[in-house]
């Protein structure tokens, strides 16, 4: 599609793409590995534990994980080293600068699927945003590497708003379309979250999984017959230390802190639950009112896939009743928390059955705190 068209300035979602790693780790496999590590650690430190100088590590269980999160399995890029009690982290050979980086590789796979589903080629796209929480490097931008691999002329840049990155990216892309600065924008969210997860921490070792998604945001004049009008968006941030990762290139200035647990994902889960649920629910209801929408009439909620309990409560506050699986679908059980990609996976897998005119909500939330809402209407 390269013919000249008259742009409308109305942004739509034309398509989405998804890359899912082949390897999965079940809770049973994860618990077996974690408990082997715990047993080994406690045996190696038995003298200090017996002397009261050190607390023994506690084992995990499938029941604990599923009750705490609703997660049953997760996809990963490198299963064997994660399950090895001696390693418990992803491992793969370092790539040269001339090779496509691993994060760009999975982002490109998701992006190509989105382009194919919309019938687009590189010449139709003006920009690439890499909106993700787990960037492989500070620079050059992952978005520009993805742009080069796809053969797209134009511009690209990275943005990181943790788990809200994709919805922040969608609003940014929509604003480019509204202003006429771009006809078509790819929002790519490659998330190898297994790299920032402390697989030796009982409270969080089960939380994350790896994946990549892509969303093609375009001017309505370019849209395929079946697409989603973007009715409105809302972003919100409130600073909090309750979800944090202190890893960065300035760590070398404070060598005494290198290797500490705070250089990986850490959170105060109960505080996050208590504070984020009302913030997100209020944001959704307030923005729906501004758009002239009845939140109770939303046909489907594609929520951030972090915790089943949080999603149940947010959906209940928005819809005014306990949401059915049809109204608030989940992918958390098989994908785990995939950070910014979670709500997009839910949308990708659970939107084709809706009817023309149905209105739904893509919403993500997480560290920052941050939250993003995208109200959409199906057109066919």
Image (cartoon, rainbow, N blue to C red):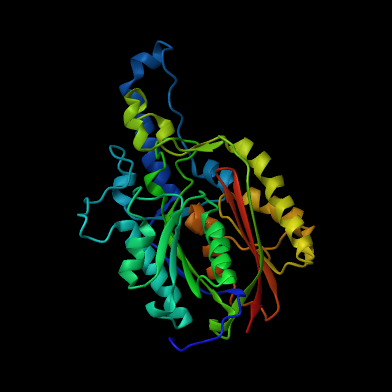
Specify the farthest residue to the top.
51
| 296, above or below 355, in the image | above
The front one of 288 and 30 is 288
The front one of 234 and 50 is 234
Residue 322 in view of the camera? no
At which x and y percent is residue 282? 74, 51
At which x and y percent is residue 237? 62, 46
Question: Which residue is at 67% across, 68% downward?
Answer: 360
Residue 318 in view of the camera? yes
Question: Which residue is at 71% across, 52% downward?
Answer: 283
Question: Which residue is at 43% across, 12% downward?
Answer: 52
| 162, above or below 234, in the image | above
Q: Quadrant of residue 83?
A: top left
Question: Which residue is at 29% across, 46% downward?
Answer: 81
At which x and y percent is residue 281? 72, 52
Q: Quadrant of residue 98?
A: bottom left
Determine whether, in the image, residue 323 is placed left or right of residue 42.
right
Specify the farthest residue to the bottom.
3
């Amino acid at each position: 599609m390269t013919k000249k068209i008259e742009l409308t300035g109305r942004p739509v979602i034309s398509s989405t793409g998804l890359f899912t790693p082949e390897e999965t780790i079940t809770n049973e496999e994860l618990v077996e590995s974690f408990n082997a590590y715990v047993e080994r650690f406690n045996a190696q430190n038995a003298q200090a534990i017996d002397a009261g100088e050190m607390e023994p590590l506690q084992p995990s269980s499938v029941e604990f994980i599923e009750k705490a999160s609703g997660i049953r399995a997760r996809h990963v890029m490198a299963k064997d080293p994660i399950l090895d009690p001696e390693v418990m982290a992803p491992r793969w050979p370092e790539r040269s600068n001339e090779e496509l980086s691993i994060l760009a590789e999975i982002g490109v796979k998701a992006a190509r699927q989105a382009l194919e589903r919309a019938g687009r080629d590189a010449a139709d796209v003006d920009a690439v945003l890499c909106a993700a929480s787990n960037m492989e490097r500070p620079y050059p931008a992952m978005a520009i590497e993805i742009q080069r691999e796809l053969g797209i002329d134009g511009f690209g840049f990275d943005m990181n708003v943790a788990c809200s990155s994709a919805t922040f990216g969608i609003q940014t892309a929509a604003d480019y379309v509204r202003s006429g600065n771009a006809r078509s924008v790819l929002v790519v969210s490659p998330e190898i979250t297994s790299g920032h997860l402390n697989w030796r921490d009982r409270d969080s070792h089960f939380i994350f999984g790896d994946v990549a998604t892509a969303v093609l945001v375009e001017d309505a004049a370019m849209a395929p017959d079946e697409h989603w009008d973007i009715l409105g968006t809302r972003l919100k941030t409130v600073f909090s230390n309750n979800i944090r990762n202190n890893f960065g290139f300035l760590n070398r200035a404070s060598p005494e802190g290198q290797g500490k647990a705070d250089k990986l994902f850490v959170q105060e889960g109960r505080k996050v639950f208590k504070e984020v649920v009302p913030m997100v629910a209020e944001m959704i209801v307030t923005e729906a009112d501004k758009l002239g929408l009845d939140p109770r009439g939303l046909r489907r909620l594609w929520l951030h896939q972090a915790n089943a309990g949080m999603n149940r409560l947010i959906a209940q506050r928005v819809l005014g009743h306990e949401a059915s699986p049809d109204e608030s679908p989940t992918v958390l059980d098989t994908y785990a928390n995939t950070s910014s990609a979670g709500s997009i996976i839910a949308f990708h897998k659970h939107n084709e059955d809706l009817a023309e005119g149905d209105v739904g909500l893509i919403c993500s939330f997480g560290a920052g705190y941050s939250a993003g809402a995208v109200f959409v209407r199906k057109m066919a």
